[in-house]
Amino acid sequence: MTEPTPVPDHAGGGADTVAARPNSAPVTARERGSSTNGHAHESVRRRGLALAAEAAAAADGDQRSGDEVEAGIVALWQAFGERRDQELRDRLVLHYAPLVKYVAGRVGTGLPSHVEISDLIQSGIFGLVDAIEKFEPERGLKFETYAMQRIRGAILDDLRAQDWVPRSVRSRARDVERALERLEAKLQRTATDAELAAELELSLDELRELFAQLQMTSVVALDDLIGAGPMQASLAETLPDDRAEDPVAALVDRDSRRQLAEAVERLSERDRVVVTLYYFENLTLAEIGKVLGVTESRVCQLHTRAVLRLRTKLTEA
């Protein structure tokens, strides 16, 4: 049997090259390309399977790692229960520290802006340490649930300790707020003092006394910004300083002193001496009389004349 002869590609033609295969039909270049693509797809499929196997192995490793961590915490609790060692307690504190940040964030959402979350976290750490010291693993309780209650309690206790307002007043303030909400929802307008007093079953005098007590519970931070745009400033910058010098009064006083000095300069020499010794040197009329060599009554007359002349000159100015 005669073998097929290969047909070479022409420069401009697109004829397929025919290869000879024993006992088989000729295979074209397009068919060889399809075979190559099949091998590529097979390689991609195998690579995908390998990646999937690696991912499954990693997930299994993470599961084993999580189990190992859990087993380590259980062993740490057992060792701490036996020895009560401070180093073991510190390791437990580090492990459960994220609970403190979580609880502090939850508690801080309902507090004024001037309360720092870092202060709440610091208080919560003491609650966590107390929870670790008092926790009994053998009772089968979950530590996270128990610790969150202790942490929250420690934060609230510290906040109450820093509050100068009695708890009874805080409770009355909440009662007033709830009463106002009920009245405004029912009346669809702002409630009057008489209506609020009736809702709280108080007299008007008792309600006003309660308002005076509640005024002490309203606190704002001095660094809070008020206003908008270029007029924005902190609250501390808007508070008056009673000890500061009044610039208007200082200007008026300076101008008055200048006018008085000019008026004194225009007095006669003897009148000027009397005024200077009496008002600036703090001498008595008798002492001035000895200096001038006249009687005390004469000095009194000179003083009266000098004051009248000064008053006239200042009035003219």
Image: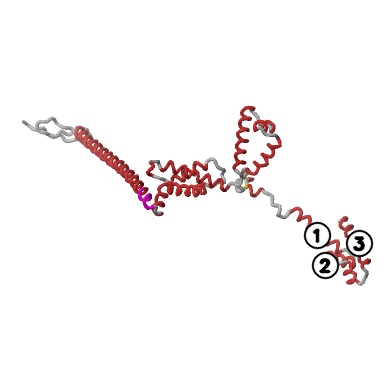
**Residue indicated by mark 2:** 281
* Segment colored magenta: 78-83
**Residue indicated by mark 1:** 257
SS state under label 3: helix
Which mark, residue 304? 3
How many C-alpha atoms fall within 10 Å of the one at disc 1: few (<14), some, or many (≥20)?
Answer: few
How many C-alpha atoms fall within 10 Å of the one at disc 2: few (<14), some, or many (≥20)?
Answer: few
How many C-alpha atoms fall within 10 Å of the one at disc 3: few (<14), some, or many (≥20)?
Answer: some
Question: Which quadrant of the rendered structure holds the N terminus?
Answer: top left
Q: Residue at x 61, y 30 (%)?
A: 182
The mark that comes first in sequence, 1 or 2, is 1
Which mark, residue 168? none
Query: Of tags 1 and 2, which is closer to the observer?
Result: 2
Q: Position of residue 181 (x, y in %)?
A: 61, 32
Q: Is residue 193 magenta?
A: no
The mark that comes first in sequence, 2 or 3, is 2
Q: Position of residue 262 (x, y in %)?
A: 84, 62
Residue 188: quadrant of the picture:
top right
SS state under label 1: helix
Question: Which quadrant of the rendered structure holds the C terminus?
Answer: bottom right
Q: Residue at x 36, y 49 (%)?
A: 76
Outermost residue, left side: 1
Q: Is the Cβ of the residue at disc 1 closer than 8 Å to that at disc 2?
A: no
